[in-house]
Image: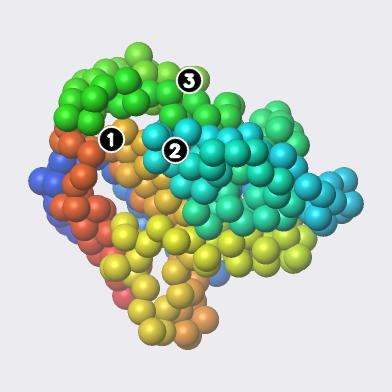
Amino acid sequence: MPDHRLLSAVRADLAAAGLRASIVVRDIDAGREVAIDADIPTPAASLAKVPIALSVLLRIADGRIDGASPVTVPPGDPAEGTPGTGRFRHPSTIAVDDLVSLAISISDNGAADALLALVPAAEVMADLDALGIRGIAVRHPFADLSDTPLERFAPDDAHLAHTLAIRGSTPAHGHPVRQLDVARTNTVTAAGFADLLEAIWRERGIPPVVASRLREHLHGNTTRHRLAPDLAADDARWASKTGTLLNLRHEAGVLENADGSRFAIVALSASTVPASVQPAAEAALGAAARALYEHLRG
């Protein structure tokens, strides 16, 4: 049973850092978990790339898609500063397999949208439904994430976009910024994403070759400043995907310990501080996940 004093203390520490958060820590083999607000729909940001990658890899495995097939990805806009093909000035030709790697390991929006053109959102949702995974909604391409108020303000006025993101939320999680409106954007719940990670690691309904490739890509994630400092160690491997958009800071992954135990850890957060760079918020989110993990592991 969760320690309610611990949960209250974690909530208080998050609030002191200006964060609202949904967190799930689950022992994926024993089935035990501890959670805070696990079922609240939250804009997914780049976490939505994981179910898209799953759907593409399923089709590569059964022959519907050739992983070696070349796909032409249009140039991006270097001024936007997004990683990978988003900074390319010219069209590029990339194999489907490598688009999956780029989408997960460096969170390449252009690569993810090329995959979504191959496997539309409706098919991704059908795959999740077949696996019995709820709480995840894939609705639109990732190019939409580069069309927020943040891109319309000068860099010195970025705080205005964050203020709109913070103040625009309604009690029902609607929002005038469509990328933050849970009825219109890609969304996840902490519980639903933990279910997806559990299915990948336990190969529940997912062919071993597909699950193995997804784990490989999640281990290769290059963004490791959010939860990894509190979780990774010489005797523990951390595999994860992050998501960042306006005032949202997410990370979700699996911690594999040397003793064989495996824990899905999902932390979804929204900041109430109107600033782009918030190292204290990143640290507080990592500390909260670590506290719940240590409690569950005992």
Choose the circle earlier in sequence order: 1 or 2.
2
Q: How many marks?
A: 3
Q: CA distance from mark 3 to mark 2?
A: 30 Å
Query: In the rendered image, which residue does mark 3 sit on?
Result: 183
Report whether residue 278 is seen.
Answer: yes
Mark 3 or mark 2, whichever is nearer to me = 2
* Residue situated furthest top in the rendering: 176
Q: Residue at x 74, y 66 (%)?
A: 208
Query: In the rendered image, which residue does mark 1 sit on?
Result: 247
**Alpha-carbon neighbours of circle 1 within 10 Å: few (<14), some, or many (≥20)?**
many
Answer with left or right where residue 263 lies relative to residue 17.
right
Report whether residue 191 is seen.
Answer: no
**Would you place residue 284 above or below residue 42 in this image?**
below
**Quick one: SS at disc 1?**
loop
Image coordinates for residue 6, horizontal then vertical, percent: 20, 58
Mark 3 or mark 1, whichever is nearer to me = 1
Choose the circle earlier in sequence order: 3 or 2.
2
Q: Quadrant of the C terminus?
A: bottom left
Mark 1 or mark 2, whichever is nearer to me = 2
Image coordinates for residue 285, horizontal then vertical, percent: 26, 53
**Quick one: SS at disc 3?**
loop
**Quick one: SS at disc 2?**
helix
Q: Residue at x 32, y 60 (%)?
A: 225
Query: In the rendered image, which residue does mark 2 sit on?
Result: 78
* Residue situated furthest right in the rendering: 63
- Give amino acid for label 1: Asn
Q: Residue at x 49, y 65 (%)?
A: 239
**Would you place residue 239 above or below residue 268 in this image?**
below
